[in-house]
Each structure stands twice: as C-alpha cells, then as structure tokens.
Amino acid sequence: MAVVTRFAPSPTGFLHIGGARTALFNWLYARGRGGKMLLRIEDTDRERSTQAAIDAILDGLTWLGITWDGEPLYQFARSARHREIAEQLLAAGHAYRCYATPEELAQMREAARREGRARLYDGRWRDRDPSEAPPGVKPAIRLKAPLSGETVIEDRVQGRVTWQNENLDDLVLLRSDGTPTYMLAVVVDDHDMGVTDVIRGDDHLTNAARQKQIYDALGWPVPAMAHIPLIHGPDGAKLSKRHGALGVDAYRAMGYLPAALRNYLLRLGWSHGDQEIFSSAEMIAAFDLPQIGRSPARFDFAKLENLNGHYIRASADAALLDAIDRLLPYLAGGDAIAAKMTPRLRQQWLAAMPSLKERAKTLVDLIEGAHFLLADRPIPLDDKAKALLTPDARALLRDVDAELAGTEPWTREATEHAVRTFAERRGAKLGAVAQPLRAALTGRATSPGIFDVLIVLGKAESRARLADQVGGGMEPRGG
C-alpha cells in the first residue's frame, strides 16, 4: 500500500515551529517511501479560523520547502459528510442521542471530580428510549464506547499505549447544533483521504484512543500512528512566547535560511548517528520513525545560529543576495534598502559577500555588515568610530588619502602595499592607520577587512568618504 501522510494545522495563528517540524517529518516520511503528503486545514473553529492564518501556514510551508500533494482540503467544507457518518453510527446502534442539558453536564463533571472519576459523562442517555426526551432539547449524538476492556495503540514512537475503557467517556460526535466534533471529523477525513500514517505531536496521544474507538465502530482500518514529543525551551518547559520566536515567519524575519531551519528541525528530536548536516536528498533517504526520541527535544537558539552560519558560508554569494531580496519585505526598514538596490550596489554587495559571510550567522548579519554600502554620505559615525577619529587621526587620514591618490591599479594588493608602506614610513603599526581609516570609510569600528572595503567601494568613493571626514576637520553631518 502506498504511504499517505497528512499535515493538519488549525488556522488560528501563525505556523508554529513545532507544527513546522511535524509537517517536515510527515513530508520526509512520505517522500522517502514514494508516497504522498496531503494538507488539511482544520478550520472547524469558525470563530478563531482566519484567512490570514491560512495564508501564513501555506506561505510558511512553501518558504521551508515543504510541498504537499494536490489541493489543500478544508475540513469545514466536509461537515455534511461528517454528519452523514454520525447518522450512520446512530443507525447501526454504535451511537445514541443524548438529551443532557448543559446544566446536567456541568453537574456530572462536578460529581466526577468529587469522586475522582476520569469518566465525566454518566451515560444516562446511553440506553434510554428517545421517547423520554425532554421537550425542546436538541440532542447531541454520542459514540456508544465500550465500557470494559482496553483500547490499545501500537505507537511507532511511544510504543504500546493502553487505556482502560472504563475511564473513557462516550464522546460527542455531533453537537446539539448539528456541528461535528473534531474527533469525528479527523477520523472521517483521514479515512476518506486514504491516510495510512498519522504522524503528529504527542499532545494528541489521548485523542488517538478516542479516535480508534470511532474507527472500530465504523469497521475502518486504523492508520499507523506515531506521536512525537513536543519541543521544549532551553529550560525544559514547553516552548512558549517567553522563550522567543514561535512562528516560522519570525525565523524568516530574523534572517534564517529555510534550508538551515529545515535541517535544524530535522535534528530536533531525531538522530542519525553523528551526522548534523543533511541535504534534502539525504534527509529523505535517512528519515525514519524509530530514530525519534521519546523525550521532548530542547530548542537551542545558539545551535540554530551556528548551523545557519554554516549554511551561509556554504552558500553562493549570488544566492545569498537573492535570499536578502526575499527577506526585505519581512524586515523593518526593508523597503528603504530595496529602494537602494541599484545594479552598482548589487555589484558592490556581491564583491563584499565573501568577507561578510565569514562572520555572519544570519541574513540580518549580512545586511548589518553591509551597512557601509547602504549608508548615505556623509557616513554617520557610531560612538566608537567617533572616538577613533581624533584630530590627530583626521590629520593622519589626510596624508593617507594623498598616498592613496597615486595608487594604481586599484587592487587589494596595491592598496595594502600603499597603506603598509605609509605606516612604516610613519613608524606606526598598521592598526594605528587601519582603524581610523575603517572608521572614516564605514562609520564603525568593525567591518570586513579594510582592504576589502577599499576595493568594494572603489577609489573615487573611498577618497570621497575620506574627504568627508578630513576636509576642514569638521564634524560630518549626521555624525
């Protein structure tokens, strides 16, 4: 039988990083076996489901490179089918109409809590004749669940999991307003979509017991199930807002590469020997469920940053500039940078990229490192650059500029020779010349190598920036 998995998010917010990992695992498992991964939008919560959230989910999956087969299925559109199955169970004697009022249900729950019982519903309408129904009360439809014995799931991550049926309620299949419940909808949709393998978070493990009872009542085969532990923060608590970004969109805005985030999520709770770096083809070939640990994985932001830095260094310069182009719409101030993207700036940025990416861990770092290319003249000076540009340093730079004026051709070797020769004549260390030169050219005390900066800017621009700082010894505008 061909493998069919599914990713089934609720569109009530962004694509959670945990949801992205679940989607990735489903995608890898299906692709590695020549199967399909389907996408189902579980939009039955009409008050909280939004089109913006649906768009964010689709966009996040696409950005991560996780593709699905066919068109997304929308659960709410299948409500008539869900009701049909509830009526089918009712007709077969596997379900019954329950006329308990909200007040009665609240009393049952309170009594169960007082008595320490897991089963909250007392089954009062399970075997009663509907003729006893109170007037004006619309019934819900409940599953006639087994009262004794066990419900067992052979989980491919958690192992054998057993529930005592006496502790499981007769769950509601159809609410009194005629809307299907999540439990029923999931079973019907998974069956109709031909899902063979359900891979999801272990917060759904209890749902698996209830859903298996529905499958059994319908005589349908139960998909193979794998419930993966949730992601925790560095402190061991469930990943939450206080740990930082939760949505895939936030990681994109922070400048992570999709391939790096995908690689990191793969290794979050899944192991394959000592291998840390995986191409997409390697992921698909290697991924299997037994290598998923049973304990929650801890999200390590420093490890993600280092991994992203590896991917940046391994990326072609032009590919990184393209990635920056795609990032700018999601970045504060990105529109202003995009407006400056002339062919000349792109050429300069590409020339600077080999030096920039050596120390960058995110695309945002690459943008920050290219500040000296993006800033308008006269270059604003940060506090450290101001401190370097003393009156003596400015006088020194005037003489450096005279040295550079005669430097031809304008190559890295020629500019380095000119500056080193100047420093030796003055009896100064190279740093005593290079640091104020860096401050004048970039407005900062740190930058790519100073000779790389000179070459990227070009002779005319470099000398113009020096003139901005040393001409008359005046403090530059914006400084």
Image: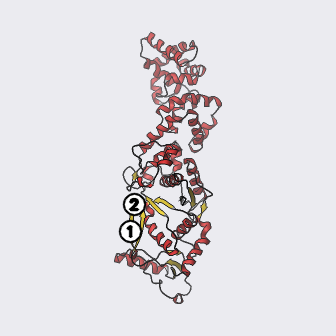
- Image location of residue 421, percent across then percent down: 47, 12
- Image location of residue 378, percent across then percent down: 57, 26
- Label placed on residue 158: 2
Label 2 sits on a secondary structure element that is loop
Q: Is residue 350 above or below residue 135?
A: above
Label 1 sits on a secondary structure element that is strand
- For badge 1, the amino acid type reads Thr
Image quarter of residue 50:
bottom right
Q: Residue furthest bottom?
A: 131
The one of 431 and 35 positioned closer to us in this rendering? 35
Name the residue: 42% across, 14% down: 428
| Residue 361 seen by the camera | no
Q: From the viewer's perspective, is 158 left or right of 449? A: left
- For badge 2, the amino acid type reads Gln
The one of 111 and 445 positioned closer to us in this rendering? 111
For the residues labelled 1 and 2, say whether their Cβ atoms are less than 8 Å apart: no
Q: Is residue 201 above or below residue 121?
A: above
The one of 347 and 212 positioned closer to us in this rendering? 212
- Residue highlighted by disc 1: 162
What colour-coding does the image apply? Answer: secondary structure
Q: Is residue 440 above or below residue 253?
A: above
| Residue 303 seen by the camera | yes
Name the residue: 55% across, 69% down: 188
Name the residue: 55% across, 34% down: 316
